[in-house]
Every structure is written in C-alpha cells, then in structure tokens.
Image (cartoon, helix red, strand yellow):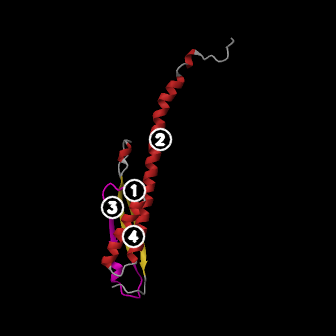
Amino acid sequence: MSRRRGTRRRDQAGSVSLETLIGLPALMVLTVLVVAAGWYVTGRSAVSSAANEAARAATLARGAGDAERLALSAARVTLDNSDLRCQDSPTVVVDTSGFAVPDGQPAQVTVTVTCVVPLAGFGVPGLGDQTVTATATSALDTYRGRG
C-alpha cells in the first residue's frame, strides 16, 4: 500500500468545509459575547466613577440643595465623558442628611447612581439590558459650616 504525497483520501474530502461551517458561527458568538462583556464592565466602571465624583462634588456644597444639584451635574458629566449611553436617563439619588448634623460632628453624603446598560442590541438570546448601580460615600468637612 503506497500512497502518493499530496493526495487526500476520499473519506476526508470536505471535512475542512464542515469544520469551518461548524466553527465559524461559534467563533462569531464568542466574539459578540466578549464585546458585550467588555461593554458591561465599562458600564460598571463608568457608573462607579460617576457615583464617586458625585459624592465628592456634593461634599463641596454649603447646603443640601446645592449638594444635590452638584452631585447630579457631576454624575451626568462623568457618564457623558465615559461615552456610556444609559438606556434611560441615569438615576442619581443623593442622601444629604449629613448636612443636618451639627458642625463639629462627623457627617457624610451618600450618592447612588443607577444606569441601564444597553446590551440587548448585541442580538444574543438571553442577553438583555443590565441595570448597574453604584453607591459612594464622601465625608463632609467636620469643622466647616453646613448652612
């Protein structure tokens, strides 16, 4: 039994085409899942940064009303700069009860940012939009007036 080099056995003919036909869609789905996972991680990071920036901005205010306004503005600017487009407007909840604490006592401001990260557009069954929430707390200056 001698075989010539470069010839292929008849029972293997077309196996490369079949392997490609099976492997290519799987590779495409895997690629889409990796991109969607990256988008989700980017969304979590952006929402966390927005919460941190909003909490920090709120502590710079002299009163609760200004703190809410500054926190909302800081969260929106941070989300806009991250190129994350929340499906709905992001929700920013500011706990300004620390401004009611008397001067000289420790107090804090807590900000919670919620954003719906759009993942349904990737076309993967079972992969829907994800709600991402982050909370950050920042201390108010103990000896500064809190109006």
Q: Amino acid at mark 2?
A: Leu
Query: Residue 33: x and y, percent?
Result: 45, 44
**Do the residues under discs 2 and 3 have CB atoms within 8 angstroms?**
no
Query: Residue 76: x and y, percent?
Result: 36, 64
How far apart are the alpha carbons under marks 2 and 3? 30 Å
Q: Which residue is mark 4?
A: 54
- How packed mark 3 is, by other alpha carbons closer than 10 Å (few <14, some 14-19, many 20 or more), is many
Q: Which residue is mark 1?
A: 84
Q: Amino acid at mark 3?
A: Pro
**Do the residues under discs 2 and 1 have CB atoms within 8 angstroms?**
no
Q: Amino acid at mark 1?
A: Leu
Q: Element at badge 4? A: helix
Query: Which mark sits nearer the N-terminus, 1 or 4?
Result: 4
In the image, residue 92 lies in the stretch drawn in magenta = yes
Q: Measured along the vertical axis of the image, is residue 109 above or below residue 126?
A: below
Q: Measured along the vertical axis of the image, is residue 147 above or below residue 65?
A: below
Name the disc covering residue 73, or none. Answer: none
Name the disc covering residue 90, or none. Answer: 3
How far apart are the alpha carbons under marks 4 and 2? 36 Å
Query: Residue 82: x and y, percent?
Result: 43, 59
Query: Residue 95: x and y, percent?
Result: 34, 73
Quarter of the rendering occupied by the N terminus:
top right
| Residue depth check, mark 2 versus mark 3: number of the one nearer the observer | 3
Quarter of the rendering occupied by the C terminus:
bottom left
| Residue depth check, mark 4 versus mark 2: number of the one nearer the observer | 4
Q: Which residues are magenta?
A: 85-108
| Residue depth check, mark 2 versus mark 1: number of the one nearer the observer | 1
